[in-house]
Every structure is written in structure tokens, then in C-alpha cells.
């Protein structure tokens, strides 16, 4: 399910674009590869995490050797600096829900794909890669030999033909290994032949021409963690006669039902696709009165339907995609919009923002990218401005989004948030400059010795652009593993521990007035990860590395009960003379968890923040369950129809108390 694609998203199939709907179509927000996934119950759940207070993470760490004064930025720059060619241009035409401020878009047409990490013919010609065996400590490989696959080759197939590859796992012990695919793309299947072998099957089409990789793991029958991973590469060629390739019908992407307010404009970003790579035409069977359909300025497969509903009630819209080669081939989709009267969105009592502002407290949310191109963008914006005085950028400043190719900058989304925040008098918290995920491929494939330069250039370019608009920044995000060891990120690989100090020093140079934050998950309760973080912060201060605060993410669950530890850890930060921010609070309902339990957790966390003089603000990671990286766990203050949940009322009550 999807809301179509967000405008200005260069690549619709790139999980790293930061484009919410193409990343995680089920919930309209993104969590591509954070390592912060919902299966990771280490995150704020009561039965996990350790209370080990000893820290042994300072041993065997690489030395930190950062000069007091950083050398000049690379000259000439490693990648082109932003210039007028990157400047956003005014949005014209009926394509958004915005009427109160001036909306801009990025100046580009469809961006080329970032091919830096694509596999090449050379990779294919290497043949199947050597097997990678994982041997658990309790297995003796001289007694129990590892499983392996026989007769593997890198196959070649013509688009339109069906490729079949037999996977036959063996074990010299005579046992019968099992197997599982590491990952199956759309259209790939692994058929069980019921004789201990499986057949990989795929019919590639025109857009698949190129080199692909399939990874499969054999599992030892006696010791299931004893495994052998094998990679094959597949070459797809275009046949001389393309007419032999089957023509499959096009599809219209689903758009989840949305709730909107009567008299507010609705925009629907409709994406059509043809598996053969041609561009289907779109027809709306029953457009609402006064509706316009505008082609997207950059994405040929996208059209924007905009209308102002004339009545309340559920509106149904039928869309048809028609194949451009054979017009008898079609795909259909039905969208629904629940149009409600203004009274449906009224809430009892004082808005959270007003109570927070009255007590000089920053109450914020993470803003959905391009919210003004969503069907419910109008009520989203009204709710945000009503309830919050503080806002952070969920995705619009992440590297893969804002700088997807060298010299290409997509500033429009952040610029639009700045315009919105200015108009509504909200303060902005910038998120996030240095992180190990949501990075563009060109950077991931860069030579390690260039990364310090890239990192400093990026920090400088982004912070100087927004120096007048964004006073608080997450400079570095998530450097630790859960056991408190430093993560072996591409930054660590290139610079050892130096990258953290370099990033903060660069940030201070680029935006001398900004508050600089270190942000991490699972550090608000006791354990090796928090200990490691506090050691790091202490070390930074000993070295005079500029740092002003700690961002405690707090993606937690309804069974969370480590409130005393949260209080203690906030105090540890305060004792280091650092500000505390709760940066990414959401409380997922674990199975059996209720809205009331959720409200208690929200209220207690807010209470801890309000009682800690150094706690300068609290941000929830979104505000409506409609748009959350954990939507299925309904983790936010309002439900998907913008209705108050007990957590909202609990916040209201607690903010009114001393
Ligand atoms: C981390 C990041 C956030 C976000 C969440 C999941 O916490 O800091 O930007 O990606 O993961 O949505």
C-alpha cells in the first residue's frame, strides 16, 4: 500500500531515498536500515537490556588524534558545492494542499540512478563467490563438516525467459542440510522440490537487464547455526527479438484510505507502473467535481489528482492504468477518502502547544517528508501547528535524501519545512548529519581516505545553508552497538574514533551559534551502551570537543518500566553539563498492550523530562498513527484519523501540572 511517491524523490525504487512511501509502503514513513527495527525488542522493553554498570568499553579503542583546529576544508572540494543550479524553484499548479506559504520544489527532472554500487559484468565473470561459512563455537568442523551447495554457476538469461537454478545442498557427514534465501525480490521464488532441493525461479523482463545477485544459506541439519552462505550472480540480456517477451498488464499503486477535513484540498499522488518498463496512461473513472489531474514535473509515472471535496462522507475514486503498447491490458485501483466535518477534529481542553509554550517547554514532532503532497496534508499541517512548538526533520536532511548524487542537492523539502515552521512560529531541530545509514551509494562506495573530507563538506554545506533557521542539530547519530562497542560504520572504518570529534568540531565551525547534540537509541536506561556513551561524552569534554547536549531517542514499548534508570541517565547527562532532549519518543503497543498503558508510559517519560531542569525538549516521532515507522503498533498520541488517544490526554494533564 502506498500514497504514491513523494514529489522530488529521485528514484522510486531506491530504499535509501528517504521517500517514505516507497520505503515502507505500509505505514507511510521510513526506516530503511536503521538497525532500529521492531524485531529488536532490546529497544525499551522491560525484559531486556542489562543493568551492568561497569564499563569495559574504553579498552583497546583506537587513539583519538584530532587537531585542536581542523585543517581547511578540501580544496578543490571533493564534490561540487551547492550553487544556483540546485536552488529550488516555485511550485506552480494545483499539486499541493498548501495555501498559506510559498512552496518550492527541486529544480530537476527525473534524476539519474546512482549506479555507483551496481554490479558489473566483471563481477558476473568472477563466477560464484567463495562460500562464507559461519561456525558456532560449539561445532568442531573436523567432526561436523559444513554444508555446501553443489554445481553452482552464474547463469545468463534473456529477458522474457524463465530462469531456473537448482539448489542442492550437501554435507559430507551424510546429513541433509536445509536452506533459506537471504532475500527474495518481487518476482523471485524458491520452489521446494520436496527432495531436499529447491529451485530458484524468475522471469526477468526488460527493466531487469543487467547483473543481479542472489544469496542463499545452507543450514547444517545437526547444528542449525552452522551455516554456509553462497552468492550467485545472474546476467539478464535483452533478446534480439523483443516481441517474444511477454507483455504484462500495468498496475496502479494502492493508496491507503485517508481521513480529511471538509473544505480542505486533497491531493493524491498516483503512481502507475508497467513491469515491462513502459509508461502506462492513467484514467480516473469518477473524478470528484472540480478535480484536476496534473502530470508530475519530474516523474513520468506519476500524476497528481487534486480536488476540494464538496460533501462530507466517504469518497470513492476508481483509477485505471492502461498499457501503452496493448491498450486492452489494464490495472485498476480504488481509493477512498473519508471527508469529515471540522467538528470531528476538535479536541477538548487546551492544545498541547499552548500549555507547553506557557511553561517554556519545547514540545515537538518529527515531520513527515513532503506532508503537503499527502491526501490529508492539510489536516496534518493544521494539527502539527496546533499541537507543537518544535519540529524535527524525519528524513528531509538525511544524506541519501538531500544529496543523492555528487553535486545534486534536494533542498526543497527542508526549505518548505523551514517556511512552514517560520509561519507557525515553531523552532526546528535538524536531524541528522553523521549516521551510518540512509547514505547514498556514491558515498558508501567512496574511498575511505576521502570520507573525512566528504563528511566535513556535508556538515558545512547543510549547516551553513540552514544556520539562520535551525538552532539545534543532531550532529552524530548512533555510534554504538547495543553492547557498547563502537559500531564499525563506514565512518569508523575511515577515521577510527576521530570522526566523532571531527564532526562536532566542524559543526561548531560551520554554525557557531547552534546547539550540538549527540543522539542515540537505547541509552536512556542503564547498561553497557549508556555507559559507553557517557564515557565518550566525558572524553569529548576532556578534549574540549564542542558538544551541548544528548538526544535520547526513546523508541519504547507499552511494557517499559525503567523510569528510574531514565531519570538517572538524564541526571548523568546534566552532571556533565549537557542539555537533555528526548528526540524520538514513541511507545509501541506490544501484543496485549493497551492505549491506557501507553498513556502511562508517555506521561511518566514526560514527567521525568519536566522534572529535570536540563531537559530542554521532548519530540515524539510523528504524531498520528497514520504516519509512523511503527504504524502497526499504533505508537503515537493521535490515531490514524487524528483522534485523541489516552496518551494525548495524559500529556495534556501532565503539562498542566507543575
Ligand atoms: C533512528 C533515526 C531516525 C529514524 C528512526 C526510525 O532512530 O535516528 O531518524 O530513522 O531510527 O524511523
Image: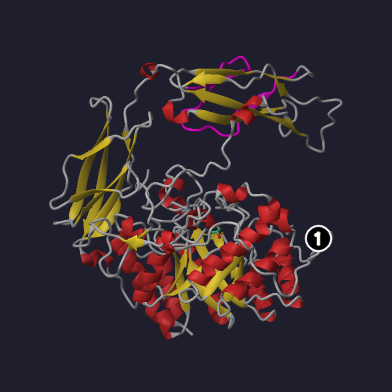
Give coordinates of residue 437: x percent, y percent.
58, 53
Quarter of the view holding residue 419: bottom left
Observer-nearest of 608 and 317: 317
Q: Is residue 42 visible?
A: yes
Name the residue tied to disc 1.
61
- Residue 552 in magenta? no
Give coordinates of residue 528: x percent, y percent.
73, 62
Magenta residue span: 175-202
Q: Relative to 356, is 215 on the left or the right?
A: right
How many numbered marks are there? Answer: 1
Q: Is residue 483 visible?
A: no
Q: Secondary structure at mark 1?
A: loop
Q: Is residue 492 above or below residue 232?
A: below
Give coordinates of residue 89: x percent, y percent.
34, 61
Q: Residue furthest right?
A: 142
Q: Relative to 132, is 460 on the left or the right?
A: left
Observer-nearest of 402 and 356: 402
Looking at the rendering, the quadrant in which ligand 1 lies is: bottom right
Colour treatment of the image:
secondary structure
Q: Is residue 513 above or below residue 452?
A: below
Amino acid at each position: 500500500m502506498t500514497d504514491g511517491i513523494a514529489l522530488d524523490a529521485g528514484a522510486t525504487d531506491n530504499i535509501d531515498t528517504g521517500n517514505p512511501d516507497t520505503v515502507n509502503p505500509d505505514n507511510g514513513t521510513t526506516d530503511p536500515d536503521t538497525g532500529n527495527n521492531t524485531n529488536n525488542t532490546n529497544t525499551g522493553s522491560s525484559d531486556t537490556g542489562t543493568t551492568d554498570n561497569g564499563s569495559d568499553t574504553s579498552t583497546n579503542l583506537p587513539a583519538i588524534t584530532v587537531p585542536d583546529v581542523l585543517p581547511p576544508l578540501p580544496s578543490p572540494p571533493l564534490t561540487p558545492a551547492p550553487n544556483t543550479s540546485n536552488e529550488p524553484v516555485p511550485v506552480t499548479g494545483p499539486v499541493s494542499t498548501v495555501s498559506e506559504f510559498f512552496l518550492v520544489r527541486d529544480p530537476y527532472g527525473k534524476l539519474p540512478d546512482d549506479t555507483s554500487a551496481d554490479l558489473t559484468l566483471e563481477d558476473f565473470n568472477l563466477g560464484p563467490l567463495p562460500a562464507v561459512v559461519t561456525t558456532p563455537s560449539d561445532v568442531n568442523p573436523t567432526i561436523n563438516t559444513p554444508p555446501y551447495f553443489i554445481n553452482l554457476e552464474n547463469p545468463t538469461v534473456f529477458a522474457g525467459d524463465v530462469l531456473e537454478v537448482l539448489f542442492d545442498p550437501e554435507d559430507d557427514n551424510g546429513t541433509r542440510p536445509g536452506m533459506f534465501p537471504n532475500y527474495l525480490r518481487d518476482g523471485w521464488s524458491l520452489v521446494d522440490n520436496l527432495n531436499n532441493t529447491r529451485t530458484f525461479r524468475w522471469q526477468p523482463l526488460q527493466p531487469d537487464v543487467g547483473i543481479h545477485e542472489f544469496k542463499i544459506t545452507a543450514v547444517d541439519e545437526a547444528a542449525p547455526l552452522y551455516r554456509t552462505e553462497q552468492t550467485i550472480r545472474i546476467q539478464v540480456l535483452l533478446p534480439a527479438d523483443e516481441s517474444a517477451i511477454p507483455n504484462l498488464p500495468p498496475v496502479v499503486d494502492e493508496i491507503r484510505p485517508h481521513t480529511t477535513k471538509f473544505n480542505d484540498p486533497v491531493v493524491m499522488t498516483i503512481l502507475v507502473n508497467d513491469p515491462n518498463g513502459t509508461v502506462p496512461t492513467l484514467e480516473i473513472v469518477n473524478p470528484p467535481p472540480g478535480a484536476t489531474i496534473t502530470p508530475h514535473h519530474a516523474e513520468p509515472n506519476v500524476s497528481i489528482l487534486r480536488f476540494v471535496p464538496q460533501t462530507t462522507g466517504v469518497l470513492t475514486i476508481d483509477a485505471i492504468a492502461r498499457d501503452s503498447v496493448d491498450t486492452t491490458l489494464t490495472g485498476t485501483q480504488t481509493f477512498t477518502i473519508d471527508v469529515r466535518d471540522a467538528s470531528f477534529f476538535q479536541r477538548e481542553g487546551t492544545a498541547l502547544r499552548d500549555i507547553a509554550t506557557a511553561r517554556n517547554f519545547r514540545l515537538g514532532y518529527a515531520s513527515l517528508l513532503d506532508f503537503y503532497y499527502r491526501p490529508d496534508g492539510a489536516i496534518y499541517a493544521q494539527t502539527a501547528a496546533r499541537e507543537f512548538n518544535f519540529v524535527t526533520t524525519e528524513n528531509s536532511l538525511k544524506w541519501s535524501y538531500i544529496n543523492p548524487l555528487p553535486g545534486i542537492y534536494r533542498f526543497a523539502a527542508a526549505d518548505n519545512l523551514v517556511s512552514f515552521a517560520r509561519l507557525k512560529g515553531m523552532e526546528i531541530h535538524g536531524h541528522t548529519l553523521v549516521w551510518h545509514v540512509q547514505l547514498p551509494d556514491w558515498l558508501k562506495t567512496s574511498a575511505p581516505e576521502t570520507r573525512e573530507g566528504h563528511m566535513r563538506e556535508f556538515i558545512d554545506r547543510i549547516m551553513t545553508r540552514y544556520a539562520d533557521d535551525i538552532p539545534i542539530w543532531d550532529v552524530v547519530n548512533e555510534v554504538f552497538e547495543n553492547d557498547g562497542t563502537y559500531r564499525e560504520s563506514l565512518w569508523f572504518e575511515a577515521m577510527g574514533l576521530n570522526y566523532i570529534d571531527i564532526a562536532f568540531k566542524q559543526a561548531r565551525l560551520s554554525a557557531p551559534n547552534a546547539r550540538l547534540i549527540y543522539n542515540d537509541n537505547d541509552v536512556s536506561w542503564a547498561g553497557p551502551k549508556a555507559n559507553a556513551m557517557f564515557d565518550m561524552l566525558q572524553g569529548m569534554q576532556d578534549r574540549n570537543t564542542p558538544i551541548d547536549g544528548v538526544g535520547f531517542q526513546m523508541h519504547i514499548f507499552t511494557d517499559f518500566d525503567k523510569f528510574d534508570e531514565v531519570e538517572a541517565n538524564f541526571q548523568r547527562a546534566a552532571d556533565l553539563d549537557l542539555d537533555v532532549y528526548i528526540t524520538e519518543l514513541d511507545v509501541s503497543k506490544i501484543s496485549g498492550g493497551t492505549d491506557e498503558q501507553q498513556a502511562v508510559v508517555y506521561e511518566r517519560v514526560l514527567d521525568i523530562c519536566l522534572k529535570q531542569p536540563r531537559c530542554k525538549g521532548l519530540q515524539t516521532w510523528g504524531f498520528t498513527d497514520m504516519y509512523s515507522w511503527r504504524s502497526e503498533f499504533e505508537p503515537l498520541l493521535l490515531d490514524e484519523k487524528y483522534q485523541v488517544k489516552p496518551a494525548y490526554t495524559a500529556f495534556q494533564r501532565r503539562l498542566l501540572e507543575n
